[in-house]
Structure formats: structure tokens, C-alpha cells
Amino acid sequence: MASSLTCTGVIWALLSFLCAATSCVGFFMPYWLWGSQLGKPVSFGTFRRCSYPVHDESRQMMVMVEECGRYASFQGIPSAEWRICTIVTGLGCGLLLLVALTALMGCCVSDLISRTVGRVAGGIQFLGETESHHVSQAGLELLGSSDPAALASQSAAITGLLIGAGCALYPLGWDSEEVRQTCGYTSGQFDLGKCEIGWAYYCTGAGATAAMLLCTWLACFSGKKQKHYPY
């Protein structure tokens, strides 16, 4: 089967997909933060939570409904920081998945990924895990350039704040009323109180870190040299 990837490129493609899947699963699962309320375990994601209090009319008291689901509306997410986190982390995960699927296609399609394209993809993966840098006028002048670093900078301008920024923003929402109810009214920004970080937060961060450190480097050697024809 024809392939546009080197052996290193195949490893990059598989690892990219694994990292993207890890980050996407972590982003979707509502287990970023663990606590308890009314004696029941409670967990939060960025846009989902498990277990929530409701008023029982027959018993005239608050009871916990032990179900998982997303918030009824975007505005229902407890804090503005978590809403921003949802957007930027979702964008980062989507971009990572797009690069990973393109890399996997390169395993089956010849001339899809050249060395330059591989380096650009690696730049996108790197930018997908960190806060985007400010876009200066000099950066905008790079538009249209064929230099891989310039193209990666263009990707940073398009994608904006991504997974790294999302993970950094998440603790800013720990002072919301919902979180304080779950964490014993002792939590605050970057202060867990009686809560604990959940596995999904680590999962999202681990997938992002692996993509940033490993996939970015492997991408530089992923594409085969293209043949140049005289016509």
C-alpha cells in the first residue's frame, strides 16, 4: 500500500491519534474535579457534572440525583472561566484530532504528507497544547509565507487559545457556588478545599503534553522527500 510517511511518520501518526483520543476522552468525561455533597460523591468536567441536588417536594428536603449529564445550557456552566475553558479546550482537541486523522490518512495515501507538511502539522500540534502567543503586526505579515514556522504561526493565529490555556483556566472556576457547595465551602481559585483533581483532568493534560513534546518532534521526520520532475 502506498504511503507518504516514513517509518517514523507511521509512529507519529499512531501516537498522534492516541494523544488526540486521550485528550478528547478526558475533555468529554465529567471527572475533572471530585468532591461530595449531602453525603454523595459529586464530580465536574468543564461542561458536564455527575450528581446534582434537587428539591424533593414530597419530603420537603434536598436530595441528590446520582446521574451524569451536561448543563442544560451554555450559560448554565457554573463560571465564565469554565465556559471559556470549554471553548478553548474543545477547539484544541478538535484540532489535534484533525491533525491525527490527516496523519493516519498519510499511511494509506502517497504524496499526501511531505516533510514540509509534516513539520507544519507538528507545529500545529505544539500550538494546540499551549497558550497562543499575541498576534503582532509582524506576525500577520507572515501570511502567505511557505516557511513551516510561518505557517505554524498562522495556525496559532487561527486556533487561538487551546488546551494548555483551558487547563490553566479551569482552577479559576473553583470559587463558583456549585464547586464551593461540593468542596465544603473552603475552595477558591487554585484552592481545592476538600475536593480532589480527577483522572480526566490528568488524562486531558497528559495527551496534550505527549503531543506537544513527542509528536511535534516526530513530525519533523514524518514525510518522505517529494520527487521533483523536470516538467
Image (spheres, rainbow, N blue to C red):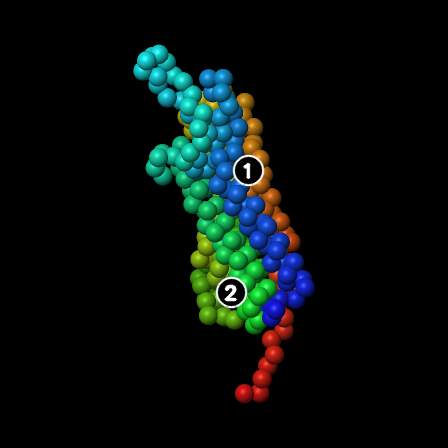
Quadrant into which the N terminus falls: bottom right
Residue 46, image x, y percentages: 46, 37
Q: Badge 2 local density, few (<14 within 10 Å), some, or many (20+)?
A: many
| Residue type indicated by callout 1 | Ala
Residue 107 lies, with reference to residue 41, above or below; the image says: below
Would you say residue 133 is visible in this rendering? no
Task: Please count the marks in the image.
Answer: 2
Q: Residue at x 67, y 62 (%)?
A: 8
| Amino acid type shown at disc 2 | Leu
Q: Is residue 192 left or right of residue 52?
A: right
Q: Which residue is mark 2?
A: 151
- In the picture, residue 118 is in which quadrant? bottom right
Position of 47 compared to 130: left or right?
A: left
Element under disc 2: helix
The outermost residue toward the front is: 1
Q: Which residue is mark 1?
A: 200
Left or right: residue 75 versus residue 202 is left
Distance between the alpha carbons at the discs numbered 2 and 1: 32 Å
Q: Nearer the viewer, residue 59 or 178?
A: 59
Q: x, y (%) of residue 86? A: 44, 42
At numbered mark 1, what does the secondary structure look like: helix, strand or loop?
helix
Q: Of 107 and 145, which appears nearest the observer?
A: 107
At 31% from the left edge and 15% from the top edge, which residue is drawn?
57
Query: Which quarter of the image is occupied by the C terminus?
Result: bottom right
What residue is drawn where x is 48% and y is 59%? 155
